[in-house]
Image (spheres, grey):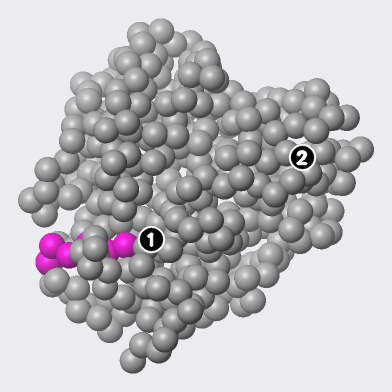
């Protein structure tokens, strides 16, 4: 039976300024009072326990990312790798996975480390905005190298990306949807140009001659999502990780003891992807609750990654944590394609900070994005502190 929670069982709580900076208290209260509750405003169950979220992510026969299977209309712009199931999903996933694996990831990691060192050296000695002068330029350059294209103008990109992110909370803020769809259309034009104008060896070069293996629009939408997540989600991971490390004194030094474990812990602890949504295909039971066909299921990944039933001292940043079965990159059919690039960049940046700039620190409180789905920082003034 539910007990009284200090926080309303409402997804709108996720958009409050104090929650944006630290959602963990909300998630803990929900898990303790009613970890599996119905949210009538959006017609969805809200799940906060790890076991329940993992079961839904792996339950491909019972839960879907493709709302068309439940009779809902989906705009053509939103039909992509993350939102389709078999039989549409496998051909696109195979094509993009083959293109991704064809890259020289060892060389990419070395060039990324060089970019990090070059950028840090250029920023040393002065206060700068970590988001727009380091995280976003770095992640844009890296994903564009993977794709085999020239990076777009960053001012333009910084204008079209936020409206796309806003639509992830479109159920709570429907007024943002038109601007987000218009921004996607601009990014679609970029994808069309890149399909023609690209460098040899990247993902676009690999895919451009093989689009007949899968629906072309579905492929282009998926490439748009790969590009957008490749810089936006990765930049948010980098910035949230810096906050986590500087909020916990001594952690920058500790990072270098085992960077691989440290990166996985940062992904768990920060959980930049806070929320995933699925639809129920057939009456079923999850976590002792009956879920009916057609009902929505909202997975609070940030809460699952702090579940004490799975992670000892879940609110403590333990950079040597092992095992660490976090859900930060999803699970199953729709797991993040570019997880390896995101972890590589995180390892490269914080390895270099630990080696050369361990006194890095924020110079002011971060300004957070007002996004409940993809958590992130809008601006963060920092000093490398040599």
Nearer the N terminus, badge 2 or badge 1?
1
Residue occupying image coordinates x 14% and y 71%: 292
Q: Quadrant of the N terminus?
A: bottom left
Q: Which residue is mark 1?
A: 12
For label 1, the crowd category at 10 Å Cα-Cα, with few meaning under 14, some 14 to 19 and many 20 or more, is few
For the question of whether residue 16 can be seen, the reply is yes
Secondary structure of the residue carrying numbered label 1: helix
Q: Is residue 149 left or right of residue 242?
A: left
- Front one among 108 and 180: 180
Q: Residue furthest top?
A: 197
Magenta includes 82? Answer: no
Q: Which residues are magenta?
A: 293-299
Q: Residue furthest right?
A: 386
Residue occupying image coordinates x 27% and y 33%: 178
For label 2, the crowd category at 10 Å Cα-Cα, with few meaning under 14, some 14 to 19 and many 20 or more, is many
Q: Which residue is mark 2?
A: 382
Q: Is residue 209 left or right of residue 115?
A: left
Asked if 310 appears above or below 15 in the picture, the reply is below
For the question of whether residue 195 can be seen, the reply is no
Q: Is residue 136 left or right of residue 230?
A: right
């Amino acid at each position: 039976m539910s007990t009284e929670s200090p926080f309303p069982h409402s997804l709108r709580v996720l958009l409050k300024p104090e929650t944006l900076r630290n959602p963990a208290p909300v998630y803990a209260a929900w898990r303790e009072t009613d970890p599996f509750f119905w949210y009538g405003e959006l017609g969805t169950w809200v799940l906060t326990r790890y076991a329940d979220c993992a079961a839904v992510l792996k339950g491909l026969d019972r839960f879907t990312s493709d709302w068309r299977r439940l009779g809902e209309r989906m705009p053509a712009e939103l039909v992509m790798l993350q939102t389709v199931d078999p039989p549409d999903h496998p051909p696109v996933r195979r094509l993009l996975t083959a293109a991704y694996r064809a890259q020289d990831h060892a060389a990419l990691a070395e060039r990324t480390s060089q970019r990090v060192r070059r950028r840090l050296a250029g920023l040393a000695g002065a206060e700068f905005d970590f988001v727009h002068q380091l995280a976003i330029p770095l992640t844009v350059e890296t994903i564009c190298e993977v794709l085999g294209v020239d990076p777009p103008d960053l001012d333009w990109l910084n204008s079209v990306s936020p409206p796309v992110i806003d639509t992830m909370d479109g159920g709570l803020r429907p007024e943002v949807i038109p601007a987000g769809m218009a921004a996607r259309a601009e990014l679609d034009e970029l994808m069309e140009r890149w399909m023609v104008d690209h460098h040899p060896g990247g993902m676009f070069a690999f895919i451009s001659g093989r689009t007949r293996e899968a629906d072309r629009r579905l492929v282009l939408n998926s490439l748009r999502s790969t590009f957008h997540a490749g810089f936006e989600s990765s930049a948010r991971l980098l910035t949230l990780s810096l906050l986590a490390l500087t909020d916990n004194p001594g952690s920058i030094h500790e990072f270098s003891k085992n960077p691989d474990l440290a990166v996985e812990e940062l992904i768990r602890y920060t959980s930049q992807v806070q929320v995933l949504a699925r639809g129920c295909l057939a009456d079923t039971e999850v976590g002792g609750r009956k879920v009916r066909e057609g009902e929505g299921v909202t997975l609070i990944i940030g809460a699952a990654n702090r579940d004490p039933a799975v992670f000892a001292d879940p609110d403590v940043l333990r950079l040597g944590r092992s095992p660490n079965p976090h859900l930060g990159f999803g699970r199953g059919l729709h797991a993040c394609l570019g997880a390896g690039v995101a972890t590589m960049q995180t390892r490269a940046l914080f390895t270099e900070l630990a080696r050369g700039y361990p006194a890095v620190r924020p110079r002011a409180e971060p300004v957070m994005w007002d996004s409940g789905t993809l958590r992130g920082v809008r601006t963060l003034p920092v000093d490398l502190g040599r």
